[in-house]
Image: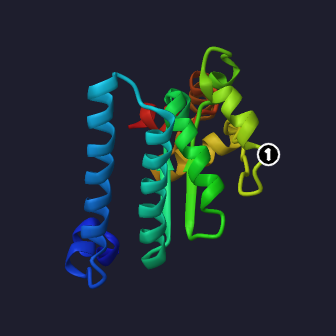
Amino acid sequence: FQEYSPEGWVRNDSDGLTAQVKRCLDDIDSLINVRVYQTGKIEEQIKYRAFELLTKTFVTISNTFPLILFLDDLQWADPLSLEFLAYIVRNTENNRIFVLCTTRNQDLLDDARPIKGWLRRISRYNAYDQIKLGPLSEGEVRAFIDTAFGSIKITEGAIKRFYEVTQGNPFYLSEIIH
C-alpha cells in the first residue's frame, strides 16, 4: 500500500501526477478566490469551470490508480458540495472512480437538509446505487461482543443490555465496549 499513499505518489511519480494535481488546485484556488473577492459570490461559469478542473484532476489520477472518494456524514454537506458530487458522478461513469458516501438515515427525513432532494435527483443516474444498512440484531451484537472480548464470557443479561442501549448501532456498540 505504500506506493498508493501520497508519499508513495511523490516518490513513484514518473508521470508528474503530483505536479498536475498541484497545478489544478492552484488554478481552482486563483479562479475562485479572485472572483469571489471581486464579486462576493461564485458565478455559475466559474463554478462549472472549477467543477471541470477538479473532475479532470480526479480522472487524471484514476488513469494511474483506481480512485475512491469516500465522504462520511454527507447529511452535513452544503448545496454546492452536493452539486459538485452530482457533477462528478455524471461525468466520470466510464472512469475508474468510485464515490462512496455515508449518511445517517434519521437525517434523511429532515426536509430542511439539502441531502434529501439531492438523493432523489441522483437516484436517476445509472451510476447510483444505495445500500441501506439496518441495525445489528441481538445475535449480531452477541457475535460482535464475542469477537471483541475473545475468550472472556459475557452474560446474556449484559448482551441484552448492550443491545437495548445501542439499539444495534455498531458505532455506538464499539464506542461503549472500548
Which residue is at a point 31% across and 82% down the rendered structure image?
Answer: 15
Q: Which of the 4 image quadrants contains residue 124?
A: top right
In the rendered image, the quadrant that contains the N terminus is: bottom left
In the rendered image, the quadrant that contains the C terminus is: top left
Q: How is the image coloured?
A: rainbow
Residue placed most toward the observer, 177 or 155: 177
Rate crowding at label 1 as few (under 14), some (14 to 19) or many (20 or more) other CA atoms within 10 Å.
Answer: few
Circle 1 residue: 124
Q: Could you say whether the residue bearing mark 1 is in a helix, strand or loop? A: loop
Which residue is at a point 71% across and 57% down the rendered structure image?
Answer: 127
Q: Is residue 109 something one can see in this rendering? A: yes
Which residue is at a point 60% across and 31% down the rendered structure image?
Answer: 104
Q: Is residue 56 rendered to the left or right of residue 132?
A: left
Q: Measured from the top left, where is residue 83 in percent x and y?
A: 57, 38
Q: Measured from the top left, where is residue 55 in percent x and y?
A: 48, 57
Residue placed most toward the observer, 98 or 49: 49
Q: Is residue 110 rendered to the left or right of residue 54?
A: right
Q: Work out which residue is located at the far bottom of the displayed protein and give it.
A: 14
Residue placed most toward the observer, 138 or 98: 98
Q: Is residue 66 above or below residue 107?
A: below
